[in-house]
Amino acid sequence: MDSFIRRIDPFFSRLTTPFIPLVLLFTRLWVAWVFFQSGMIKYSSWDSTLYLFEYEYHVPLLPWHWAAYIGTAVEVFIPIFLTLGLFTRPMAFVLFGFNIMAVVSYPALWEKGFYDHQLWGMMLLTNVIWGAGSLSFDHFFNRRHLHHSY
């Protein structure tokens, strides 16, 4: 059994390693799309957004109008960075915290949307821990820097 495990794990590692950049790209694009869409809805129906932040969402530590502006900006701009794979780890970390704040601030979300937020949180953590992968501007700039730093 021991020798089987020592053979099978490296085999599957070689088999799956080429797909790592695609998985990291997939997680970035999925989460970016979800949050960008949400931000655009907030932006396009601003009166409703202000109402929701004043009466429905309970964002701790921030006045509701600040929370509305900051929340909308985060949902519109950070997904652009994720899509490009630029500053991926810090941007995914900020969006991970934002995702937690969304769940905490809107308990009505728990019944129908909590699973989605868990999924997005895990996708974001994937990019916080492993970065953007080779299909990103982060990789391009890091590789370029390594070639020019001798």
Image (tube, rainbow, N blue to C red):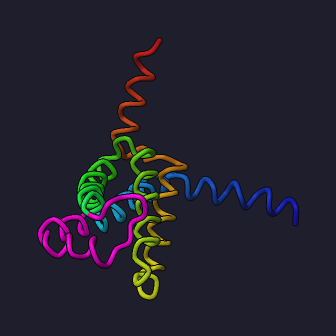
State whether residue 133 appears in this view: no
Could you tell me which residue is drawn at 42 percent across and 58 percent down?
Answer: 61
Residues in magenta, as a range: 36-64
Dominant secondary structure, magenta = helix
Q: Is 86 in front, or is 142?
A: 86
Give me the residue at 40% from left, 37% from top. Answer: 139
Is residue 141 shown above or below 109? above
Relative to 107, residue 14 above or below: above
| Position in image of residue 18 (x %, y %) | 50, 52
Residue 68, image quadrant: bottom left
Q: Is residue 46 visible?
A: yes
Report if residue 66 lies within the magenta region: no
In the rendered image, the vertical position of residue 95 relative to residue 43, given as above or below: above
* Residue 1, image x, y percentages: 87, 66
User: In the figure, is residue 95 to the left or right of 36?
Assistant: right
Rendered residue at 35%/65% (across/down): 30
- Residue 32 position (above or below residue 119): above
Residue 23 image position (x, y, % from top left): 45, 59
Name the residue furthest top.
Answer: 150
33 sits to left or right of 23: left
Quadrant housing residue 64: bottom left
